[in-house]
Amino acid sequence: MKAFSKEFQAELKNLMKWRRDVRHFNTTPIPIDILLDCLNAFGMAPSVGLSEPWRIVRITSDKSRGAALANFKSANADALAGYSGDKAQTYAGLKLSGMNDAPEQIAIFCDDATTKGAGLGAKTMPEMRRYSVVSAIMSFWLALRAQGLGLGWVSILDPIQLRNDLGVPKEWHLVAYLCIGWPKQDTLTPELEKVGWEQREPALTQWIER
Amino acid sequence: MKAFSKEFQAELKNLMKWRRDVRHFNTTPIPIDILLDCLNAFGMAPSVGLSEPWRIVRITSDKSRGAALANFKSANADALAGYSGDKAQTYAGLKLSGMNDAPEQIAIFCDDATTKGAGLGAKTMPEMRRYSVVSAIMSFWLALRAQGLGLGWVSILDPIQLRNDLGVPKEWHLVAYLCIGWPKQDTLTPELEKVGWEQREPALTQWIER
């Protein structure tokens, strides 16, 4: 049985602490071998019935990047309109995407129509396929941070519009739009906490028993 | 900026490789301090708008464990009825839950009605709250494995029935039922691959460009 040292366990905790959602990137390109190495985290992630439903779309063309940015701007303006007073002011000041700077941008889809896995584990909970994709993204995120790279998960987007703009199959459901690059600064405090949008719960995890 | 060593990066890869979905457990109890330590991975996970929507229900009573097991048995029989021929035979022989043996069983819900985070990032993609919960589960899974513990994610369940049986708020949506314990054996090969249910893709991650 493969055992992991106390030192590794402690450093894994540090990795989780230092994993932040990054929105401020340097524009320095990421060497392709580092990106590839981190992307291999997908192949090691759990997936329901071994369905491996993740579909990775690397956004490289000006046209696709422009469409994604316009999509974000529109969704963000809509979201801002839903707040008022102080909350609206704080929201307007937030940097919610790194799409202007992040050298790598990757859209991650879930192929809801895949026959791989033959539906095992997804009958009563078909959302398990999308959850598998999220598990893979989380693995990728940690792998990136271990290399010093930051990731920002953009969800202020119209997912159908993005799918259409990218011309991917209609069975593919957008799970995440990821901005990736070297972070401008490193911090243990989420930006949303810094600007007073929301506080994290104290460290001790709460649960109920049944 | 916190840097991680090459050795740590390599060991993180090992952790991801050795993280398996475990269904065969020893019944030896898990010391509470180890469980608590691993549960703290939840507090370090990303969540949309800092909404931290995870709700943790530790299943300790015979009544709750019995209800969950009955739920699984019924959903599993339904699922089996959907297969025929060889696939049905293989399915019938699979061990798809460790609910009889796993010393710790934890149901994880997403509070879809939380006001924490004020809806940030969840307007066009409200599923982001559930994805946040999945990210936390994945972090927890890796923390457990670093301690030598195995986790099995059971999704062959009627989620509404389980929520009702556990008597938790109706705004809580079941994301996962987790069986946790010391694995009976350690392997790099998923059981579904061993029995010929499905193959994993070769390691090299595929993508398309747009």
Image: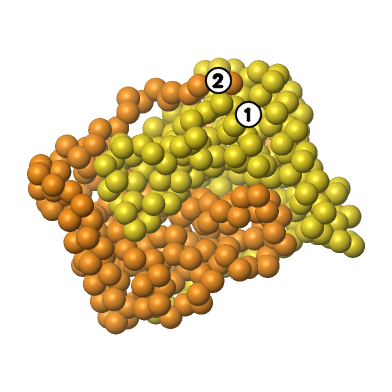
Chain colours: A yellow, B orange
**How far across and down, in percent of the image, does residue A173 sit?**
51, 40
**Residue visible at 22% across and 42% down?**
B192
Q: Judge whether residue B62 can be spotted in this image.
A: yes
**Residue visible at 20% across and 52% down?**
B82
SS class, disc 1? helix
Check the image and report above or below for B172 versus B90: below
**How far across and down, in percent of the image, does residue A147 sit?**
57, 30
Q: Which chain is indicated by disc 2?
A: B
Quarter of the image where the C terminus of chain B is located: top right
Check the image and report above or below for B207 versus B139: above
**Residue visible at 53% across and 52% down?**
B131
In the image shown, does A109 or A187 lie closer to the viewer? A109
Q: How many marks?
A: 2
On the picture, is A76 further left or further right than A117? right
Name the kind of residue labelled 2 in the image: Glu
Work out whether disc 2 and disc 1 sit on a shared chain.
Answer: no
* Mark closer to the observer (2, 1): 1
Quarter of the image where the N terminus of chain B is located: top right
On the picture, is B3 further left or further right than A40? right
Which residue, given by chain and number where applicable, does mark 1 sit on? A165
Name the kind of residue labelled 1 in the image: Asp
Check the image and report above or below for B190 versus B107: above
Q: Judge whether residue A146 can be spotted in this image.
A: no
Res. A4 image quadrant = top left
Numbered circle sitting on residue A109: none
- How dense is the environment of label 2, judged by Cα within 10 Å: few (below 14), some, or many (20 and up)? few
Which residue, given by chain and number where applicable, does mark 2 sit on? B209
Q: Which chain is indicated by disc 1?
A: A
Cα distance in 3D space between marks 2 and 1? 13 Å
